Image (tube, rainbow, N blue to C red):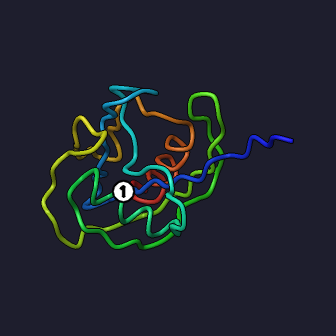
Amino acid sequence: MFYQNPKPAVGVFIVERNKILLAKRAIEPFKGWWDSIGGFMEEGEAPAETAIREAKEETGLDIELLEILGIGNDKYEDYSTVPISYLGKINGGKLKPADDVAELKWFTLEHLPSNISFEGNKKILKILQERYTQ
């Protein structure tokens, strides 16, 4: 019997002074669209460990996780994912796009790009807009 179980993934949303750091995807799906920092969990990894590892790999930054913003479900190509979204803050490192990221850019929460990848990201960004722009 085969079960098509969803894959666990994480997203990190770094907010500083009413701006959020987003990553332009360098790979499909959604190549060229803006995404949270993050990726899939590796075997034996806890979600928080994945978030910290992915942030370092994709941005060069050392981060601290502040809270879980949400846990949801999403689609990645032809399978389902369970994204766990974190709010993070920068503790060090040097900002430099790497891994599967084409560009990193700070956006104000009032003026986000229209091409945001994945429905889960859109939901979390709406939560952050409500929290920080009131």
Neighbour class for label 1 at 10 Å: few (<14), some, many (≥20)? many
Q: Is residue 19 above or below residue 121?
A: below
Residue 80: x percent and y percent?
66, 39
Q: Is residue 17 left or right of residue 75?
A: left
Quadrant of residue 56 in the image? bottom left
- Point 22% across, 62% down: residue: 61
Identity of the residue furthest to the left in this view: 94
- At which x and y percent is residue 60? 20, 57
Number of marks: 1
In the rendered image, the residue lying farthest to the front is 1
Of residues 13 and 95, the one drawn nearer to the viewer in this rendering? 95
Q: Quadrant of the N terminus?
A: top right
Residue sitting at 32 percent across and 26 percent down?
32
Left of 108 or right of it: where is 40?
right
Residue 68 at x, y percent in the picture = 53, 67
Residue at the farthest right position: 1
- Say which quarter of the image contains residue 30: top left
Q: Position of residue 3 (x, y in %)?
A: 80, 43
Please tell me whether mark 1 sits on a helix, a strand or a loop.
helix
* Residue at the spot of label 1: 54
Quadrant (top left/top right/bottom left/bottom right) for the C terminus: bottom left
Is residue 123 found left or right of 105 in the rendered image? right
Q: Nearer the viewer, residue 93 or 34?
A: 93
Say above or below: 33 vs 129.
Answer: above
The structure residue drawn at horizontal position 35% and vertical position 43%, both measured from the top left corner, is: 110
Q: Specify the amino acid type for callout 1.
A: Glu
